[in-house]
Amino acid sequence: MSTQTTARGRNPGARQTGSPPRRRTHHARALAVLVVPFFALFTLFYLLPIGYAVFRSFRTVEREGTFGPATEVFGGLTQYEQVFASDAFWASLGRVALFGIVQVPVMLGLALVLALLIDSPLVRGKRFYRLAFFAPYAVPGVIAAIMWGFLYSPSLSPFSAVTSNVPLLGGGMVLWAIANVVTWVYVGYNMLIIYSALQAIPGEIYEAARIDGAGQLRIAWSVKVPLVVPALVLTGVFSIIGTLQLLTEPQVFRSFTTSVSSTFTPNLVVYTTSTVPNFNLAAAFSVVLALLTFVLSFVFLRLTQRKAFQ
């Protein structure tokens, strides 16, 4: 009796639909194949150069007598003392700080406006405008600097009527002439980052705003801009790092004007010092510059995050 009941309860005629338990598969080898090449290249081309620069920054060269053989020994903070005593280095930092305070907000403001215009439903030909605004970024920095250098030069520019009266390559204007080149090259790149953030906003948010009676300008200012703040922060960090690494444009402009010295920017100071050659002092300059870049980027992130949570 109990056997029949048990058989009915089990319903042996019914098919079992449950899938068999899966066996755990280990993908250690596959992960190693994918991860090890990255870490090898990361170590070889990033960590080792940083470590070597730090190592060289603590070295100094000593000579026995005036014409004795040069011997490289541990010098402690000798190179860093020269860095902090270098007026040219700190003057170059002040120059790029002024550059960044003016150029970065202007560039990101233009990028935001262009991204909002392309994202607007009133604009047609969005693919063309995306490509047109991004095209300058595809131009190598050296080529862009040479092109603008010719446009600024009074004797070479097709706009000589303007460049002859406005000294764009003079000492008071050359920094902003370089800023114009950097803005022209990178505004389209930053625009695409912001535009990608706009594309990720759900359409229901726009629909709710339109139901509430908001127009396109109101939607752009009150809905789109607050939601793309993380993208603006990201582009801001990239811009701060790029400003402190400014090298190509001023290096090219040195062939057009004497207003750009060999210590015009911090990276030019490093480059000039290494061509002396004084690799140990150049390494110390590089380490200090890297630390300043990290500190400024970290402070910028902290300030923007604090404002976002207020």
Image (cartoon, rainbow, N blue to C red):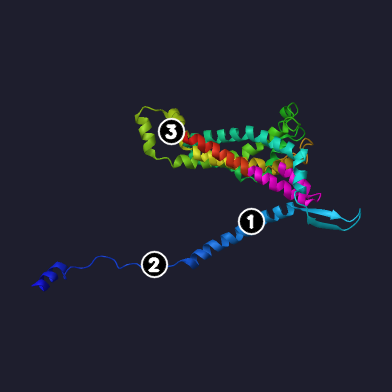
Across and down, in percent, residue 309 comes to 47, 36
Residue 7 forms part of the magenta stretch: no
Q: Residue 108, how many percent across, how many down?
A: 57, 36
Residue type marked 1: Leu
- Which disc number belongs to residue 47? 1
| Residue at the extreme right | 66
Residue pictured at 66% horizontal, 37% vertical? 181
| 97 relative to 86 in the view: left or right | left
Nearest-to-viewer mark from 3 and 1: 1
The three-letter amino acid code for the residue at tag 2 is Arg
Residue stretch rendered in magenta on the structure: 266-293
Tell me where residue 184 appears, x and y as whole percent.
62, 37
CA separation, marks 2 and 3? 46 Å
Residue that carries the numbered disc 3 in the rendered image: 223
Residue 237 appears in the figure: yes
- Secondary structure found at label 2: loop
Labelled disc at residue 24: 2
